Amino acid sequence: MPVKPPAEVDLTTDLVRALLADQHPDLAALPLRLAAHGWDNATFRLGDDLAVRLPRREVAAHLVEHEQRWLPTLAALCPVPVPAPVRVGRPSGRFGWAWSVVPWLAGAPAATQPVPDRTPWAPALAAALDALHVPAPAGAPVNPFRGGALAGRTAAFRERLAAGHLDAAFRAASGADTSAADGRQRLETLWHDALAAPAWPGPLVWLHGDPHPANLVVAGNRLTGLLDFGDLTAGDPACDHATAWLTFDVAGRTAFRDHVDTHADARGPLDPGRWRRAAGWALVMASALVTHGDDDPVVAAAGTHAITELLREA
């Protein structure tokens, strides 16, 4: 399985403190520690209330620029806190890409919370995504991996399927004695059903793009934040609705779906294919999470969970 791409720059507390001293000296003396070293970005907690978010690869630098441009707009829409930049770091001789100082969102990743405990905040997540799903302007970021026609993700999904990356997840869902061939066929059937669903009948809307449980922040029974808008784009809202399987069990998914169906249909066009397309997005996202499982067991578990839920529902 692929592992996390290596960082293209050595991100250290010394470097971050020097960047702050150069561009935001009033923040440079605050306590600083590494909080997360993700696939694309590293996050350093700064004092009690702030964080510094820096790209660790050139490809991610453009995503940070998208966040700086558009997150203030989305923060004004969303009823749940999002890490809209409060300070902007400019490229310099010390660090060649843009970086941001953002609010520190209190809580813990939803991925660390037992799945049954997530049901109480399922309607809040549905409401937050619904608030984001308004028509996006023509200049919204383009993301070839999120929000477009599902058919565009067929090659990636089938490559992961053929390589056997999903076999372990399928066996976890269906039993150790289930054959890989049977598992792949059942997942292919789910994929074909999603591809055959009616298309989204509305305009391209703002999307979070990656709402798996490691990007959701919770405190007790409350949703306290949405993280990592690196996949921010415009497209089919069913892409974000994939979180129904990535994040919840049947009880939470029912609460989430009921809120979406009530509020989205009241505000926008009727969408008879919504949940079939969302299931397809859940399958392609879960396949990506499982594929990268050797590097990040937390997101791999979210992928396995989603495949289990999709097969149970099917």
Image (cartoon, grey):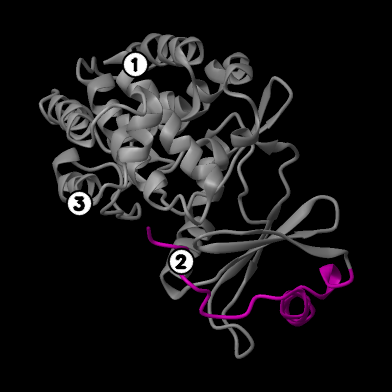
Point out the tag, 1 or 3, that comes first from the N-terminus: 3
Estimate the x, y position of residue 308 in percent, counting from the top left.
Answer: 38, 25
Task: Label 3, secondary structure: give it.
Answer: helix
Q: Which amino acid does the dot numbered 3 rest on?
A: Glu
Q: How many marks?
A: 3
Report the front residue among 189 and 258. Answer: 189
The quadrant in which the C terminus is found is: top left
Report the front residue among 58 and 233. Answer: 58
Residue 201 seen from this side = no
Residue 254 seen from this side = yes
Relative side of 270 to 2, left or right = left
Task: Label 2, secondary structure: give it.
Answer: helix
Quarter of the image where one finds residue 95: bottom right
Q: Which residue lies furthest to the bottom in this view?
A: 93
Which residue corresponds to mark 2?
60
Relative side of 269 to 307, left or right = left
Identify whether 288 is placed above or below 112: below
Task: Label 1, secondary structure: give it.
Answer: helix
Q: Are marks 1 and 3 in contact (CB under 8 Å)?
A: no
Is residue 2 inside the magenta stretch? yes
The quadrant in which the N terminus is found is: bottom left
The residue range painted magenta reads 1-29
Which residue corresponds to mark 1?
312
Point out the tag, 2 or 1, that comes first from the N-terminus: 2
Which residue corresponds to mark 3?
159
Whole-angstrom CA distance, mark 2 to mark 1, is: 36 Å
Residue at 36% across, 24% down: 175
Relative side of 283 to 58, left or right = left
The crowding category of the residue bearing disc 3, from other C-alpha atoms within 10 Å (few below 14, some 14 to 19, many at least 20), is: few
Residue at 36% across, 39% down: 168
